[in-house]
Amino acid sequence: MKNKCLLSAWITSLFITLTACNNQPIPLVYNVENTSDGFPAIELPTLEQAVEIQTLPDPFAWADGSGRSTKFKDWKRRRSEIIQQMQHYELGPKPMVSKDSLEAWMDSDTLVVIVHEKGQTLTLRASIKYPEGEGPFPAIIGVGFPTGSLPREIFEERNIAGIAFNFTQVMSHTQKRGEEPINKLYPEHVAMGAYSAWPWGVSRLIDGLEIVGEASRIDLSHIGITGCSFAGKMALYAGAFDERIALTIAQEPGGGGMNSWRVSETLGNVETLGRTNRSWFLESMFQYAEKNVSRLPMDHHELAALIAPRALLVLGNPDYEWLAEESNYVSCQAARKVWEAFGIEDRMGFSIVADHMHCMLPESQYPEVEAFVDKFLLGKQEIDTHVTKAEMFKDVDYQKWMPWALE
């Protein structure tokens, strides 16, 4: 009986997916970095001009106040608005790069990418740990290590390649503004935060894989990214700003990542907007600290929503107060409304589990990670990825933060 129910639920989900957009399937991934590029610039009010929004902003509401749309056909335009807001208020622009300004080749099992800009160059080298065989292989981009902080056996047992992203080749962990490798290419963007720079580097690796082509032995339609803690934030931003990434796994990203600035402000000794690392964001963002956080026109449930309609799994750990997992939980619930509106809620899940060290995946979370990997990197569509695990927050009234969800 259980199997029949699961089969029925899967068929229903598939039917919704196939019919959600004029009888066209909603893509699992795209072959361009940003499908939302080219939409008109929106008005971006100053702190003094901004209207206070005490609850989480409506991810479906147009920036000009002209209404809202939950239709998938309108999502590219809404993504454009959220990207403009995120980069204006928090990050600085993520520079666009022409393929004509790139060189790329394989040096044994290392991908080499050289970016040329204004007579300057920046070189990225990423080692790739391949499974046995010829490929092409699905791949996970891990921050620092081939599989990030996730157990490598999850990927190795599935013949998934691991690509290590050395973020220091772009910008150091605590940048010195104007003195980082990326600043040589873009001196006009000296104010940029690390969470604009690092995703830029991830995108250049994907560009390199595209240029190298078959020689990379990577299946470009099945690329994921993962990281933990500050690297979990990095994975989230990279997935949000590059639609060629099919699966984002953000492990314990904390404040500045999945968490809502507004919700975190109501909690205890946690990473609020005013307490996060200043080098990761625009200096100007910090004028929105504390009571001014409600004047931001967006929040981080909308950062996560930029990944839609692609797949996102968020992992949390309530054993560490600083991570503010209640804020993570509320923000996940709010973000998931976007996937739900498009009938693809199986593509967004969260699992917040206690009793383990920071960035050490407990066995209790293996099934969630394995399910998302199987479905979105291996293409096993029969796998159940409806994951909303956070038992310790079952009594939290997350609905009060999202009145728009009841409309």
Image (tube, rainbow, N blue to C red):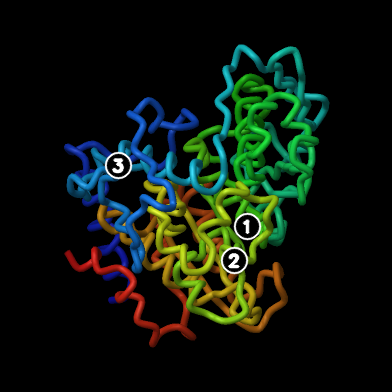
SS type, badge 1: helix
The amino acid type, in three-letter code, at marker 1 is: Gly
Q: Which residue is mark 2?
A: 254
Which is more N-terminal, label 1 or label 3?
Answer: 3
Residue 377: x percent and y percent?
Answer: 53, 47
- Crowding at mark 3 (Cα within 10 Å: few <14, some 14-19, many 20+): many
Looking at the rendered structure, the secondary structure element under dot 3 is: helix
Q: Quadrant of the N terminus?
A: bottom left
Residue depicted at x 78% and y 32%: 181
Q: What residue lies at 32% left-to-right and 54% top-to-bottom?
A: 59
Are the two marked residues, 3 and 2, in contact with CB atoms closer than 8 angstroms?
no
Q: Give the Cα distance between marks 3 and 1.
A: 25 Å
Position of 94 compared to 384: left or right?
A: right
**Left of 234 or right of it: where is 172?**
right
Which residue ends up furthest to the right in the rendered image? 108
Q: Amino acid at mark 2?
A: Gly
Residues under labels 2 and 1: Cα distance? 8 Å
Residue at image x 38%, y 33%?
36
Tell me the residue that label 3 is attached to: 75
* Mark with earlier residue (2, 1): 1
